Image (spheres, rainbow, N blue to C red):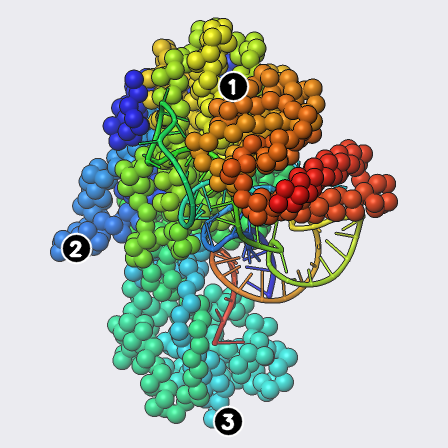
Amino acid sequence: MLDKSFDPASAEPRLYQAWETSGAFKPNPDPAAPAFSIVIPPPNVTGSLHIGHALNNTLQDVLIRFERMRGAAALWLPGTDHAGIATQMVVERQLAEAGNISRRDMGRDAFVERVWTWKGESGGAIANQLRRLGASCDWSRERFTLDEGLSRAVRQVFVTLHRQKLIYRDKRLVNWDPHFQTAISDLEVEQREVEGHYWHFAYPLEDGSGEIVVATSRPETMLADTAVAVHPDDARYQALIGKCVRLPIVGRPIPIIADDYADPDKGSGAVKITPAHDFNDFKVGQRHRLPMINILDPQARLNEAVPGAYRGLDRFAARKKVVAEFEALGLLRGVETLRHAVPHGDRSGAVVEPYLTDQWYVDAKVLAGPAISAVEDGRTVFEPRHWEKTYFEWMRNIEPWCISRQLWWGHRIPAWYGPDGRIFVAEDEAAAAAAAREHYGREEPLRQDEDVLDTWFSSALWPFSTLGWPEKTADLARFYPTHTLVTGFDIIFFWVARMMMMGLHFTGQAPFRRVFINALIRDAEGAKMSKSKGNVMDPLELIDAYGADALRFTLTAMSGQARDIRLSTARIEGYRNFGTKLWNAARFCEINDCAPVQGFDPAGARDRVNRWILGETVATAIKVTQALETCAFDAAAAALYRFVWNTYCDWYLELIKPSFRAADAATTAETRAMAAWVLETILRLLHPVAPFITEELWAKTGRRQGLLISTDWPQLSQTWIDPEAGSEINWLIELVSEIRQLRGEMNVPPAAKPALALIGAAPASRDRLERHRPLILTLARLSSAQTAPSAPPGSALFVAGEATGALAIAEHIDIAAERARLAREIAAHAADIDRTARKLANAAFLAKAPDEVVEENRERLAQSESAKARLEGALTRLESVA
RNA sequence: GGGCGGCUAGCUCAGCCGGUCAGAGCGCCUGGUUUACACCCAGGAGGUCGGGGGUUCGAACCCCUCGCCGCCCACCA
């Protein structure tokens, strides 16, 4: 006997264990099975599961379980990312909190050792959290971006791209994060609106003939100015072009140059040029061969290139000092306050500086070409499609990708420097040494590049490096390209685009056929969840409170949202209740001996109620299958919810209750078998979304071999739908609903059992009434249900298709209320008649609308008119009685 | 400046390949000890589908426009 309800806390770990030990997570080894593979977006190795992961991984699990049941060799490959900057940051913070020495004092080897220790301590957590969610990953294939195999892939890719001149070293401006003291890529820069100022400075002309005014929000950079630019056509400054100004504070003469970059409409029309500390100025500097003076050290303090009083000052202190000095010199021409966007490091939150350094770059422009084509011609499809536009926009304007980071946690760049600075790029030190020996003609000491690669460099290889590339492994052959990638739109650029580029370049094939972009989760008020706001919903706590299935069902049902999902516990609670409902339906079946019958052929059912539920089941199975095929997760969830609760529980189980007391043993047996068969089908259809409760019921109802996770997906034929049975039972449902509604409106006490008379019923309705009389009596709580030539006096009338129902509830009828009810119904019909009649009177409608639509409206009109007439008759009679 | 998404019952959202599509859940109201379930059952109230215009026989659904809300990219001397 089933317990009163499902207990997720005790069942979930047990069921997960059973799945894992059964080997169900491993792909079907049958070579004839089609491959269906997903690589997980690898979470940070030391991270913990947040609600976004819960959504993302639920959807992946739904797909994987669905395809696995459909017979595919389904592989969901899990793993984690070393997350260079994020992990290093965490460990550095730990060191600081413990009052330990900094990483620099500690030294590289000791620090990296420390990170590995931390990885060892916390690294398994997220995998276990995914298990709690029910994720059916093949853990035997779990990967980590710093694994030897993946590291080898990274080195090979680097060396190959370098040989192809698609990776190169260059000295140019980068976005420099002074907190981490590393270069970061454009994508890691976040523009934040802050309160700022523009200061207007006068630079005196060298010949003393006047001054030129420039404006800046970063006064300290003036110490590195090497020119002032004006527009070549700017009449105001024609005479000054070629002259010099004497740079205040510094005393350096710098030229006034003509360049299109200067916008005559902005400010004074003259702009200070700081090539080493501004991206636009850098280009101007290159065009005019201006000196590039770097005035910052890696921590953004001023260096030796500035006057003594400024050396060693923090940039912001220097800013104040420069302004003060201009004011003192009488050269401050104004200051305005305004909000403007300032670039910040997305991890550190520090203001980033354009900084002139040597870094490694990927020529992304070249790699982007094939990645654009693959989406253009549909080899890879985004779902929803509109994200392709975002992808194209970025890819078509892609800039060189700075891949070197001055960090310690990550893949060390496989480049070695000779004594003369010559670079030897090779897969390992021995190969580099060999190349050096070749080059120098003798043994020379080599020094490996200190830097590591951007974390996303290794992530970009994830779909193939995890499958064994560069080895030609069986997994690679079978599971690459992967089928679907499920990820958030926030990493389309960081990750998806780069996987596309690398996948195509190194394998010739796009890494996935389909990219499903899921929404981002917000709290119930629509705010982004963040630890500082304290509005974070912890998926593990939600699982504790409601069970994993409830959380999964909620996330699945809400996954249709375009951008944001507002998650509230009320919704989760609702889906927890849904699980309980299903559980109780199973209990009902158990109590009534509805156990699966070996060899039962649902299509052979004779009873109309059974034939009806069969049809409904088939329709649902088709709907759910189509929805899951197209990533319409919310539609699948909705169809299942509706079918289980509203169709199976509310109607079918109620409709069959009387049959257990009936004398017809054959029908009863058929009903029992059907009820069990439908329940079993529900378990199968529901399993991808709610794996735990369905697996538990699978085990506890009926004697079954094997686990539900490894069972086949229902393949039901559309031909099993019996439209006759469907319309008959729908007639029954409508009749009962009408009576219930009437009882409710008339306040007929539940205990009262009035008689029903059906007037003017067509033969088909008479037959149906005869066949289902016991059901109608029970469900509508009636004493009798007969056809009659006319309505008994004092009864309330309602429309039941072509017939008129008369409910003998004279003692409950409040004349005024009944009059109001009838008037309301009549008005509703009148409105409908009006609308429909007007349509049918419209010649254009008759001429242009499809025949079936016209016919539909004719029928509708006839029905409404008939209904209205009958209700009017009832109203008249009521008036005459009163 | 460029682009994207949203604006449908009190709340969260379906519906948006135009013709019973005006819906669901939650909340609210009324009634309920029907031998699966009160995490339940039966019933109910509630919306001129953001505003305006257009296309069409017909628009929540297509087009234009305006207005809010949110996001992305670029830029801001």
**CA separation in Å, label 1 and label 3:** 110 Å
Three-letter amino acid code at disc 2? Glu
The reply to whether residue A386 is in sight is: no
Residue A845 locus on image (x, y percent): 82, 43
Q: Which residue is mark 3?
A: A209
Quarter holding the C terminus of chain A?
top right
**Residue drawn at (65%, 45%) of the image:** A879
Q: Which residue is mark 1?
A: A774
Choose the circle earlier in sequence order: 3 or 2. Answer: 2
Q: Chain of mark 1?
A: A
Relative to A81, say whether A97 is above or below.
Answer: below
Callout 2: helix, strand or loop?
A: helix
Callout 1: helix, strand or loop?
A: helix
- Image check: A675 left or right of B48? left
Q: Nearer the viewer, mark 1 or mark 2?
A: 1
Snapshot quadrant of residue A368? top right
Say which of A148 and A836 sits in front. Answer: A836
**Residue drawn at (63%, 37%) of the image:** A377
**CA separation in Å, label 1 and label 2:** 76 Å
Q: Nearer the viewer, mark 3 or mark 2?
A: 2
Q: Label 2 crowding class (10 Å Cα cut-off): few <14, some 14-19, many 20+? A: few
The reply to whether residue A279 is in sight is: yes
Q: Which residue is mark 2?
A: A97
Choose the circle earlier in sequence order: 1 or 3. Answer: 3
Cβ–Cβ under 8 Å for marks 3 and 2 = no
Q: How many marks?
A: 3
Q: Which mark is residue A743?
A: none
Residue B7 locus on image (x, y percent): 55, 55
For the residues tagged 1 and 2, is the chain the same? yes
Q: Residue furthest bottom?
A: A209
Q: Chain of mark 2?
A: A
Three-letter amino acid code at disc 1? Pro
